[in-house]
Image (cartoon, rainbow, N blue to C red):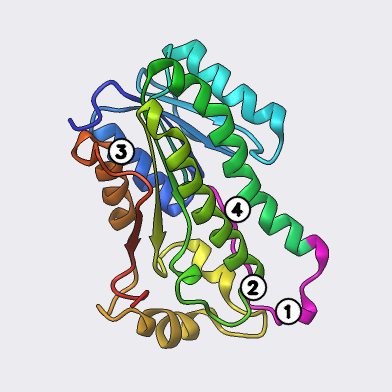
Amino acid sequence: MRLENEVFVVTGAQGGMGKETVKRFLEEGAIVVAVDLNVDGVEESDQLLPIAADLTKEEEVTNVFSTAVANFNRIDGLVNLAGIAQPATPIEEVSLADWEKIIRVNATAPFLTCRAAVPYMKKNRGGVIVNIASISMVRPRPGLNAYIASKGALVSFTQALAIELAEYGIRVNVVNPGPADTDMLGGFTAKEQDFEIIKESVFKKSVPMGRLIEPIDIANSLVYLCSKEASIVTGAVLNVDGGRGI
């Protein structure tokens, strides 16, 4: 029970990685506030509180954290899994609206959730934040220009927070997943391409260890980073990518 009785806000809780992370955190004894745009079908319990929210809206983010504290009296950690993909698109075809949406969801929303969580963690003189970026910001793929920019911003933001919050005992780290076997993977495929073919011929073959990353791989890395086993780890960028970033 590495996370026993600790309260974690997990965003993107209904995605492939999110569901597995919520499951693993519950197995490790955590109390989880599971946040997504739609949480229909998520059953509330003593250990699990689902909250529907659009994390690009300040007032909804504020409500998530005030509700969490009202129910559990504290916030020990935040895991930002929420994000959106970008279909591979040449830069000249990327609209300003598309660019702004990707930046808003992948970079601005984590800023808002971190900003909302930090005062509660400072009050407790400790806490942990883990943001989910992407190995593509280390080794870019063509056509993912806005997505990669958003994830690069998130890594820099994470490390800026790590140094800013260290004196308060708050650790801030980032995980870079490689191509993962989730529904989101199809979102990176260009509109005219066959996803199943691209999945095998491009995504899987890009991983030196020969398989796609599974949600459990990410969830296990998050358990470690949020546990006391990583009590001195902050500002770290952990590539969970089967060697894709090498």
Q: CA distance from mark 4 to mark 2?
A: 13 Å
In the picture shown, does residue 237 fall above or below 49? below
- The residue singled out by tag 2 in the image is 145
The quarter holding residue 214 reads bottom left
Tell me which label, 4 or 2, sits earlier in the chain. Answer: 4
Q: Who's the residue at 58% across and 25% down the image?
A: 64
Residue kind at label 2, given as amino acid type: Asn
Part of the protein shown in magenta: 82-97
Residue 79 place in picture, x, y as percent: 43, 40
Residue kind at label 4, given as amino acid type: Asn
Q: CA distance from mark 1 to mark 2?
A: 7 Å
Q: At numbered mark 3, what does the secondary structure look like: helix, strand or loop?
A: helix
Q: CA distance from mark 4 to mark 3?
A: 21 Å
Residue kind at label 1, given as amino acid type: Ile
- The residue singled out by tag 3 in the image is 226
Residue 187 place in picture, x, y as percent: 58, 68
- The residue singled out by tag 4 in the image is 106
- The residue singled out by tag 1 in the image is 91
Tell me which label, 4 or 3, sits earlier in the chain. Answer: 4
